[in-house]
Amino acid sequence: MFKCNSKKNRRKPLPPARLFLFALIWLSGMVVSPAHAVDFEIKGVDKDKVRDNISLYLNNLDIETGLLADPFWQEEIQKTVSTAAEPFGYYNSETFIEVTDDDTVILQVSLNTPLKVANVTREIIGAGREDPDFRQRFNKFPLKKGDVLLQPVYESFKSSMLNYALTHGYFDFAWQATRLDLVREEREANVLLIAQSGPQYTFGDIRIVGEDKAEAIIRRLVPFEVGEKYSSTKLTEFNRRLNQSGYFSRVIARPVVSDAESLRVPIEVSVSHRPRDSFDVRLGAGTDTDGPRIKLGWDRPWVNSRGHSVSADLFLSKPEQSLTTDYRIPMRDITNDYVSFQAGYQFIEYQNSQTESETLSLAVHRYWQENNSPWQQDGSLTYLREYFVQGADPEQTTSLIMPGYAIRYLEKDGDLNINNGTYFQAFSQIGRDNLGSDINIVRSIVEGKMIRTFADVHRVVVRGEAGAIKTNDFSRVPASLRFFAGGDQSVRGYDYRDISPQDTVIDPVTGESSLEPTGGKYLATASVEYAYQFAESWRAAVFTDIGTATNDWDTDPRYSVGTGIHWISPIGPIRLYIARNFDDRDNVNKWQLHFILGPEL
């Protein structure tokens, strides 16, 4: 058994004979005993952080088991334990060492009474002394008189105070004096902290490096004024706005402190504009579209120096083809506040519901959204002219002019694979036969979806949708505005748009009659799905769906149950479901397979 007091832990020089012996062993490659990691057993230390720190320090010792009995190495072990305990206030620890027959080293550690803070002396020199926020932050030094001296807390405060100063414009900040005076015999410590804050800098002019055609746009995105106190938070917000604006392929704003004049720091914005034209191809698939679908996009982000942009999308699938264009004019807030002029053409032919429509639409939208808010609002005016054939009704064309309003909430933790997200939208349009529309119509719809993941593996998805149409002539309501249910994103277990009021349709060739969906005035659907992630990229799911599209709320809703599997692929989740409905109609398939590729929000 060996005892060492940490106050006397001073390494003594080795005698020449021992130095010669160690050198001989090293040069000849001899070993006193087989080298392997030494097992230390620490006793007497109840505090986990202290014990873990001692273990960490001991693991860094390079010692052979054959040398454990040597007083030099025992003294080295005790010194290591003492050093590891000091950051937690234990400057007077003692360590006893015992080496067992199996070369386990048992350390009996007596931490003894820790040093406590006797006095804390703090002072600010410079402009920070008159800054209440700086002074409040400085006075939050966490160690008070009577507290155990914790060096990690002391060092952390010094680092955090430096970071605070730099992020608030005190670029000349320095610690004029920092000191810990240790009085070991009295078990006390005195803390001295004197900060030289220097002056507080302010925001200066914006300098643009690179192409300057975006100067007007960039200046509209600046969230601060020249002469305003510098804040890294506002600079971060500036960078966020620049990157989310969609005008640049690369952009960064940074302070150039070395060029500051009269304490004003110029902000340098390095920009690289997006290409004049960009193209993208987005692929997807689903049983609702009878297989694959493709979306071709074109975007011109810079029509002029005022930030106008134009884009177009071509959508192709077996039942639907469409072309839409969008011309945007940024308003006060470029990122979230803009006017959009849209034009579109769409052709649809759904064989299962005897629906055929050809639609031309023109619309103007005014979008606005507060900074950092998930809520977006949209006021619109739409002109729609649709030629359509629905069920047994004759061919007809309806024109509508409809003002509308929508509000949307969207928050999610990813773009492709979403573990937690919330979506909600309410939308309403109105048309009057004495204001340019062929019929009176009010159409409203509310929809929402919530995704939550618990303990990383349990995933719950809840969604719902409700809609209603009020009109003086439902037979003239365009097919694209009527309500249908069924399909991948509605009531699984049914074909796409298979749930709705039905009409008898007679085939002109065979003369046979059949019941075909015609679309309803009302819509209501709901779904609950649970998925369990059983492997890194795989989830198994079970679900139940219920819903109806009807002209009469007395109609019983349709429902289904099913199971599925998700593959979390690099291009987004791929979901395969098999569902069974409980419909009593003879002409409805009881089982449906649903395949979906793409994000859920």
Image (spheres, helix red, strand yellow):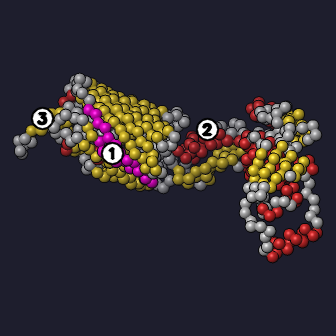
Foreground residue among 454 and 505: 454
Residue sitting at 84 percent across and 48 percent down?
Answer: 95
255 sits to left or right of 344: right
Q: Which residue is mark 2?
A: 223
Q: Is residue 562 magenta?
A: yes
Q: Residue furthest front?
A: 101
Q: Which mark is residue 504?
A: 3
* SS at badge 1: strand
52 sits to left or right of 397: right
Q: Earlier in the sequence, mark 3 or mark 1?
A: 3
Q: Nearer the viewer, mark 3 or mark 2?
A: 3
* Callout 3 amino acid: Thr
Q: Earlier in the sequence, mark 1 or mark 2?
A: 2
Q: Is residue 453 magenta?
A: no
- Disc 2 residue crowd, few under 14, some 14–19, many 20+, Cα 10 Å: few
Residue sitting at 77 percent across and 58 percent down?
Answer: 101
Q: Earlier in the sequence, mark 3 or mark 2?
A: 2
Q: Is residue 75 visible?
A: yes
Foreground residue among 261 and 485: 485
Q: Nearer the viewer, mark 1 or mark 2?
A: 1
- Disc 1 residue crowd, few under 14, some 14–19, many 20+, Cα 10 Å: many
114 sits to left or right of 532: right
Q: What's the CA distance linking mark 3 and mark 1?
A: 31 Å
Foreground residue among 194 and 449: 449
Q: Which residues are magenta?
A: 558-579
Foreground residue among 556 and 289: 556
- Disc 3 residue crowd, few under 14, some 14–19, many 20+, Cα 10 Å: some
Q: Which residue is mark 1?
A: 577
Provide residue 24's location: percent of width, then percent of height.
85, 74
* Callout 2 amino acid: Pro
Location of residue 76 by image quarter:
bottom right
